[in-house]
Image (cartoon, rainbow, N blue to C red):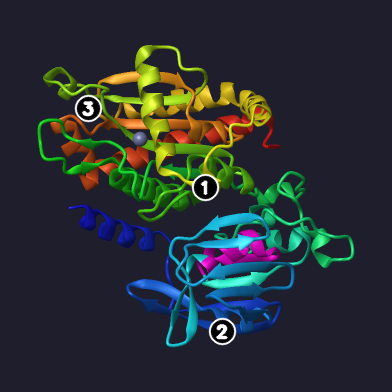
Amino acid sequence: MIGLFLALQIAGAAAAVPIPTFIVVRDGAVTASVPVTINGGEPSVRADVLMKAMKGALITGTNLHYTLVLARTKLDLIDGIPFAKLDTLTIPLTRAPQVRGGQLYLPFQFVSEVIPRYAGGYVYDVVLGELRTFVGPNAGVATAAGKTPAVRAPVAIRPSTPVTTNNPASTLPKAKSVSVPAKAKPIQRKLVVIDAGHGGPDNGMTGPIGTTPWFLEKDVTLSMAKKLATVLRARGVDVLMTRTTDTLVALADRGKIANSNHGDVFISVHVNAPGYNTAAAARERGFETYFLAEAKTEDERRVQDMENESVKFETGAGAPKGDPLSFIITDMAQNEHLRESNDLAQTIQNGLIEVHPGPNRGVQQANFAVLRGSYMPAVLIEIGFGSNQSEATFLSDDANQRALARNIAESVIAYLAHYESRIGGTR
Ligand SMILES: [Zn+2]
């Protein structure tokens, strides 16, 4: 049943961005084409062919390490690991780069998202299947005003490395200081970080109570997170997922991933369970949304302790250090977003009333480790009780998951629009 969810999800995710049979890499009038091949049902491009088309280089290191060298940036990859590294920045990938027949293949996401976002100076045109360079703040806008309205202005690019003055990239606008002609109506792209709770050895809650457990929280949160990502991407919002597979990401690292990628909003998806195991507990149901604050009630403290339990699965560098000073700094950084986090939680909670059988358990506050590390409006959604037979069945249903994901996405978009109008989009 879980396998089926994942299969459906992969098909759904692939359908969100049209996959051409080849992409065109364009630098002014100069073009080169790069075939898109399907490997194991997934669209991929050959790293060496892409680098040649982009006038970059693919360097093969030792121990399955690879480096993509482009004019303005270098990305490090490891065969079989679904992350790319840009200096100290970790970029989650939809799928691991893979060597087949002696060649390194990159997930198509590299062309559609990673290079436009991180390489600096590229936009990907979904309509034409074209990855092209732009120079200066107005080049992309001129194109966007032309026959390819799907192209977004270079405001979509968030340079993640400092630009030096002797580099042509210095003309690249930073996301905060873009000036473009008013008629171009550029969309300030937002980045939503979606965190699927638990993963790997940490199953999260299992249920329902009174059955041989068939409901694993980690699987439902991942399936939900992917659906939410698909809807948001289709609506022109950038999405970063802290995990896209059944892996464990340390609680502290989930926030770090969000921060280092400059997320605008952080959403952690979980499934609830009561703290006891009785017939009454089996009847508990409903949805609630948390934002970060000191836990107030017994029930809030229970959920907090349950979700923070994941730490025990973490070892080594990812585990919290417990440095009191870092906690104070983290607290201060998060505090300025408390109000926004509360607003976001309220918007999501109110939206869910439309699609969730309920009951509505309201907006709650707790001191979650996963929310503590993210310096942006951050919420944790408990989408229901997997401990309850009927709610576990409801939450496992693909159509219900889609409805919940669409609803949450609409709330996030409404929140972002509201937030933008309030602060003038200068965040
Ligand atoms: Zn959980």
Question: Counting residues from the N terminus, which is met first, the one under dot 2 or under dot 1?
Answer: 2
Q: Are marks 2 and 3 in contact (CB under 8 Å)?
A: no
Q: CA distance from mark 1 to mark 3?
A: 41 Å
The residue wearing badge 2 is: 49
Asked if residue 151 can be seen in this view, the reply is yes
Q: Earlier in the sequence, mark 2 or mark 3?
A: 2
Q: Amino acid at mark 1?
A: Gly
Ligand 1 closer than 8 Å to label 1 CB: no
Quadrant of residue 204 within the rendered picture: top left
Secondary structure at badge 2 equals: helix
Judge left or right: residue 273 versus residue 139: left
Which dot marks residue 199?
Answer: none
Going 63% across and 80% down the picture, which residue do you hit? 59
Residue at left offset 44%, top offset 33%: 411
Of discs 2 and 3, which sits in the foreground? 2
Answer with the quadrant where ligand 1 appears in the image.
top left
Q: Which residue is mark 3?
A: 357
Task: Please provide the residue range marked out in magenta.
Answer: 110-127
Q: Is residue 161 above or below residue 394?
A: below
Residue at horizontal 71 percent and vertical 67 percent from the top: 73
Relative vertical location of residue 146 with respect to residue 199 in this rendering, above or below:
below
Question: Does the magenta segment cover residue 121?
Answer: yes
Identify the amino acid type marked 3. Pro
**Which kind of residue does numbered mark 2 sit on?**
Val
Are discs 1 and 3 less than 8 Å apart at CB?
no
Residue 64, position in %: x, y? 52, 75
Given the current orientation, which residue lies at the most extreme top position?
297
Q: Disc 1 designates what residue?
A: 316
